Image (tube, rainbow, N blue to C red):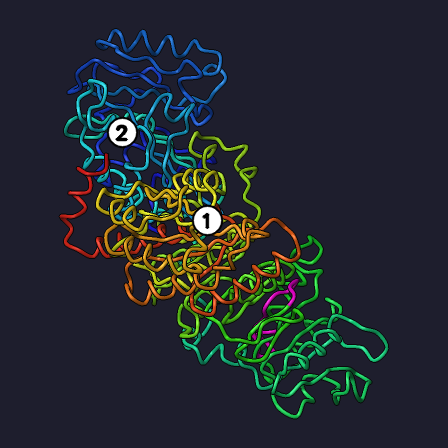
C-alpha cells in the first residue's frame, strides 16, 4: 500500500470520503481520463478560476456531508459561461441539504462529449478484499442490476470477460442504431482501477467503496465524469497474499503426514463410567482397524476401552502425531500448553470458543497455548478427521478404500453427511477434515495440502467463512497443480451490505463475491449436499478434456416424456441435446429397431428395444453414435420400473457392458454417465444399488435422475472451459484483443 497525502489529510480532517476533485486527481495520477476542472472557493474569482476551460460546464458542490449530489440538487449541467457558473452556484447554495452541509467549494468541469454511460464501482469484501464492478448505466444498473464483479487484482482476461458477461453487452458494438464504443478503453480503465498496479491495489485497505458513475465511453476513449471514494473507518490491513505462518515445509506432504497417517493417536475426554464422544471415537478407531498406537488420556484411570490410559500428553510412551481433544473448553489451553512439544496436531472437538461471544478470548488463548506447546490446532468446534490412508475415522462404517477426493468441511455434522452419502453414491475419499472455527489451521491450509497431495485428484470444500480470503483466492487462482475444486457454501447472505452507502455496495452481496471467485478460479459453486456429491462423483470418474469442453450431449434410454424433460434440463445447464446429423440418423434407422424407437437424439428406446439381443443392441447403437455424431457426452438413462412384469429378461447388465466396451473402443471420445431411475420400491432400490456398484466398478458414474446428471456435466463443462481459457491466456497477448472483438 502506497501512502497518499490527499487520503491522509482527508482522514486527519475527520472526513469519511474524498471530495470529487481529490478523487479525480487521484484517478488522473494513475492515467485515468477525467474532464478538465477547476475548484471555485466560496467567494472566489470565477473568471480567473475558469481560465483555459471552455464550456459547457458541469457545476457540483464539494461537501463531505453530501455523497449523492444529484439527489440534493447540488449538480447543474450544461452551464455556458462564467455568468452561468455564478448562477449555478447560487442555485446549488439555496438547496436545503447544501445549506445544512459543510461546503468546501464548487467543482466546475468541462462536460464530456456524449457517449455510452457505464458504471465502475468497487467495494471492500470482508473475506477477499477489493472487489471491482462494471455495468451499463441507467436502467441497466439501477433496475436490472446488470453488473459483473471480480476480486482484485484483475487480469486483462478478467476485464474482457466482465464486459462479455453483461446482458447489455451488444450496446458496446452499436446495437439499436448506436455507434460502437471503444471496448479496449474500458478494459484499460478497469485495469487502471483494479489491476495489479491499479488504484485499488496500490491503496489497498484505504477504500471501503468506490463509485465512478457515470463513465462516458466514446468511439476512442472512456472518461470518468463523476467519482466517489468512501474511506474505510480505519486503514484496513491489506488482505494477506498467498503466504502462511505454516513453515515452508507444510506446502509439501511430509508436514501433514502425521495428521493424515498418524502412528500415534491420543484421545482426551474418554470416560471409565460413561460413553462420551471420545469413547465413541476410540471404539470407531478400533473397529476401523487403526494400526497405530491409541493413547487414552485421563488423570486417574489406568485403562479405558481396553487400552492403557496415561495421565497427560507428556506421559505417553511416544510423541503424539494426532490428538483428539474433547474435554471442557476452559481446560484445553493449559493441556496443550503443557504438551512440551510432544504433540504435532491437536483437533479440538469441544465448543465454547469463537463461535460464541464469550469464547473469543478463550479461542485466542487456545491458539497461543498450542503454539507454546509446539502443536497446530484443527477446530475448535468440529467433529474429527477421516483419513482412510491412515486408518482414522470419526463416522461409523466409513469406507476403508483410499480414494481421490479430498474434502474440507467447516461443519462437523455436514462432514459426516458428505462421507456417508458420498459412500453410497460411490465417492471415495483421500481424506476429510472438519475445521470448525479454523482458529489456527483452516481451509486455505488444507486446500494447499490437497493441491500438493498425489493421492488427491479432486477437492471439495464446505465453507461458511474464510478468514484468510486473499490467500485462499490466490491458491485457487494459481494452484501448484491443476485439480477440480467444488465449493458448497453456507450462509450466502447479503444482509451485511444492507446499509451500504453506494450503489456498488448495495449490489455486492456475499453471493457476488463467491460468484466472482468461481469465475476467476474455475471453482464450481453448489448450494446443496446432493449437488456437491454429484459434482465430486463426476470429477472422480471422468477425465477432463479442456481441449474439447463438454457441450454436445446424446441421450439414450426409455421414456419419451422423460427424454423431453431431460432435454430441457440439459439446455438450462448450457448443454445441447441437438438432433443428430442426417448420416447418423440414417445409420441408426438402418438397424431396424423395434417400433416406437426414435433415433433423432434423444434416442428414445422403449423396453422392447432395450431388451433386443438381451441389451446387446446398445453396442451397435453406441458405435454408430460415437463414430458419426458430434458428441462430447453420452447419457444412458434407464427406468428400472419399466421392466417390472414385462418378461424378456433383464438387459441392464449387458447395457452397462456395452457402455464399458464403447469407452474402451473409442477412448477419450466422450464422457459416459448412467442414470438409473426407480419408483421408490425396496426391490428396485436394491436392484439400483447392485447396478450402481457394477457401473462404478468399471469407472462409470451413476446418477438417480437426469437433472442430476445434467448438473454434474455442467460442472464438468465449467472447469473444462476454465482450463481451456487458462491455456488460451498463456498464448500471445494478441489473443486478448481478438477476444474483445468476439465477446459480443
First to last magenta residue range: 370-383
Mark number, residue 236: 1
Q: Residue furthest right?
A: 273
Residue 738: which quarter of the image?
top left
The reply, left or right, for residue 476 in relation to residue 500 is left
User: In the rendered structure, does residue 378 fall within the stretch colored magenta?
Assistant: yes
Mark number, residue 224: 2
Whether pointer 1 and pointer 2 mark residues with C-beta atoms closer than 8 Å, the reply is no
Residue 253 vertical placement versus 185 (above, below): below
Q: Residue 392, position in %: x, y?
A: 60, 77
Residue 47: which quarter of the image?
top left
Residue 494 vertical placement versus 612 (above, below): above
Q: Nearer the viewer, mark 1 or mark 2?
A: 2
| Mark toward the start of the polypeptide (1 vs 2) | 2
Residue occupying image coordinates x 72% and y 84%: 312
Q: Residue 530, position in %: x, y?
A: 55, 52
Residue occupying image coordinates x 42% and y 77%: 249
Residue occupying image coordinates x 38% and y 35%: 210
Under circle 1, the secondary element is: loop
Under circle 2, the secondary element is: strand
Please tell me which residue lies in front, 492 or 618.
618
Q: Residue 489, position in %: x, y?
A: 53, 50
Amino acid at each position: 500500500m502506497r501512502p497518499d497525502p490527499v487520503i491522509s489529510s482527508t482522514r486527519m480532517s475527520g472526513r469519511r470520503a474524498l471530495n470529487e476533485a481529490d478523487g479525480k486527481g487521484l484517478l488522473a495520477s494513475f492515467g485515468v481520463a477525467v474532464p478538465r476542472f477547476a475548484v471555485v472557493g466560496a467567494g472566489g474569482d470565477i473568471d480567473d478560476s475558469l481560465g483555459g476551460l471552455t464550456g459547457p460546464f458541469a457545476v457540483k458542490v464539494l461537501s463531505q456531508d453530501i455523497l449523492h449530489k444529484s439527489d440534493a440538487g447540488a449538480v447543474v449541467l450544461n452551464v455556458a459561461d462564467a455568468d452561468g457558473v455564478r448562477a449555478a452556484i447560487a442555485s446549488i447554495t439555496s438547496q436545503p441539504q447544501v445549506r445544512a452541509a459543510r461546503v468546501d467549494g464548487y467543482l466546475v468541469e468541462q462536460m464530456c462529449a456524449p457517449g455510452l454511460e457505464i458504471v465502475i464501482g468497487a467495494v471492500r469484501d470482508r473475506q477477499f478484499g477489493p472487489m471491482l464492478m462494471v455495468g451499463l448505466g441507467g436502467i441497466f444498473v439501477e433496475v436490472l442490476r446488470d453488473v459483473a464483479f471480480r476480486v482484485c487484482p484483475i487480469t486483462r482476461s478478467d476485464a474482457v470477460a466482465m464486459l462479455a458477461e453483461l446482458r447489455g453487452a451488444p450496446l458496446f458494438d452499436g446495437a439499436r442504431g448506436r455507434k460502437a464504443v471503444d471496448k479496449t478503453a474500458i478494459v484499460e480503465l478497469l485495469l487502471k482501477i483494479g489491476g495489479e498496479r491499479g488504484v485499488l491495489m496500490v491503496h489497498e485497505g484505504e477504500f471501503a467503496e468506490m463509485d465512478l458513475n457515470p463513465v462516458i465511453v466514446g468511439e476512442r476513449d472512456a472518461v470518468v465524469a463523476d467519482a466517489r471514494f468512501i474511506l474505510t473507518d480505519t486503514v484496513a490491513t491489506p488482505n494477506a497474499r498467498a503466504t502462511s505462518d505454516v513453515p515452508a515445509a507444510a506446502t509439501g506432504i511430509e508436514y501433514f503426514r502425521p495428521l493424515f497417517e498418524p502412528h500415534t493417536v491420543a484421545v482426551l475426554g474418554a470416560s471409565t463410567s460413561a460413553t462420551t464422544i471420545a469413547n465413541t471415537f476410540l471404539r470407531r478407531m478400533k473397529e476401523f482397524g487403526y494400526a497405530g498406537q491409541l493413547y487414552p488420556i485421563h488423570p486417574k484411570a489406568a485403562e479405558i476401552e481396553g487400552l492403557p490410559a496415561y495421565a497427560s500428553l507428556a506421559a505417553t510412551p511416544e510423541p503424539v502425531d494426532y490428538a483428539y481433544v474433547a474435554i471442557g473448553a476452559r481446560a484445553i489451553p493449559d493441556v496443550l500448553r503443557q504438551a512440551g512439544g510432544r504433540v504435532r496436531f491437536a483437533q479440538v472437538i469441544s465448543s465454547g470458543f469463537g463461535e460464541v461471544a464469550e469464547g473469543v478470548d478463550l479461542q485466542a488463548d487456545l491458539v497461543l497455548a498450542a503454539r507454546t506447546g509446539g502443536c497446530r490446532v484443527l477446530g475448535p468446534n468440529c467433529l474429527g478427521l477421516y483419513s482412510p490412508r491412515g486408518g482414522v475415522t470419526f463416522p461409523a462404517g466409513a469406507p476403508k478404500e483410499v480414494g481421490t477426493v479430498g474434502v474440507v468441511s467447516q461443519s462437523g455434522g455436514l462432514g459426516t453427511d458428505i462421507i456417508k452419502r458420498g459412500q453410497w453414491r460411490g465417492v471415495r475419499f483421500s481424506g476429510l477434515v472438519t475445521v470448525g472455527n479454523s482458529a489456527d489451521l483452516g481451509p486455505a491450509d488444507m486446500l494447499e495440502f490437497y493441491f500438493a497431495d498425489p493421492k488427491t485428484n479432486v477437492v471439495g470444500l464446505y465453507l461458511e467463512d474464510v478468514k484468510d480470503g486473499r490467500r485462499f483466492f490466490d491458491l485457487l487462482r494459481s494452484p501448484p497443480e491443476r485439480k477440480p475444486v467444488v465449493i458448497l457454501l453456507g450462509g450466502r447472505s447479503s444482509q451485511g451490505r444492507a446499509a451500504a452507502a453506494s450503489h456498488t455496495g448495495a449490489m455486492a452481496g456475499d453471493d457476488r463475491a463467491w460468484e466472482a471467485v468461481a469465475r476467476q478460479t474455475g471453482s464450481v459453486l453448489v448450494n446443496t449436499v446432493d449437488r456437491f456429491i454429484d459434482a465430486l462423483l463426476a470429477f472422480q470418474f471422468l477425465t477432463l478434456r479442456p481441449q474439447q469442453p463438454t457441450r454436445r450431449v446424446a441421450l439414450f434410454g426409455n421414456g419419451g416424456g422423460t427424454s423431453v424433460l431431460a432435454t430441457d434440463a440439459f439446455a438450462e445447464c448450457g448443454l445441447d441435446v441437438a438432433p443428430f446429423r442426417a448420416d447418423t440418423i440414417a445409420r441408426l434407422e438402418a438397424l431396424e429397431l423395434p417400433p416406437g424407437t426414435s433415433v433423432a437424439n434423444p434416442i428414445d428406446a422403449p423396453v422392447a428395444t432395450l431388451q433386443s439381443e438381451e441389451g446387446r443392441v446398445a453396442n451397435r447403437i453406441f458405435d454408430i453414435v460415437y463414430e458419426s455424431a458430434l458428441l462430447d457426452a453420452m447419457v444412458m438413462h434407464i427406468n428400472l420400473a419399466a421392466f417390472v412384469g414385462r418378461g424378456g429378461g433383464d438387459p441392464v447388465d449387458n447395457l452397462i457392458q456395452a457402455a464399458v466396451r464403447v469407452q474402451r473402443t473409442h477412448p477419450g471420445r466422450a464422457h459416459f454417465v448412467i442414470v438409473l431411475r426407480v419408483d421408490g420400491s425396496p426391490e428396485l432400490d436394491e436392484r439400483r444399488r447392485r447396478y450402481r456398484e457394477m457401473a462404478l466398478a468399471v469407472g462409470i458414474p451413476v446418477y438417480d435422475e437426469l437433472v442430476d446428471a445434467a448438473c454434474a456435466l455442467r460442472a464438468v463443462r465449467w472447469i473444462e472451459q476454465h482450463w481451456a481459457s487458462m491455456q488460451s491466456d498463456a498464448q500471445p497477448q494478441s489473443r486478448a484483443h481478438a477476444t474483445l472483438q468476439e465477446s459480443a
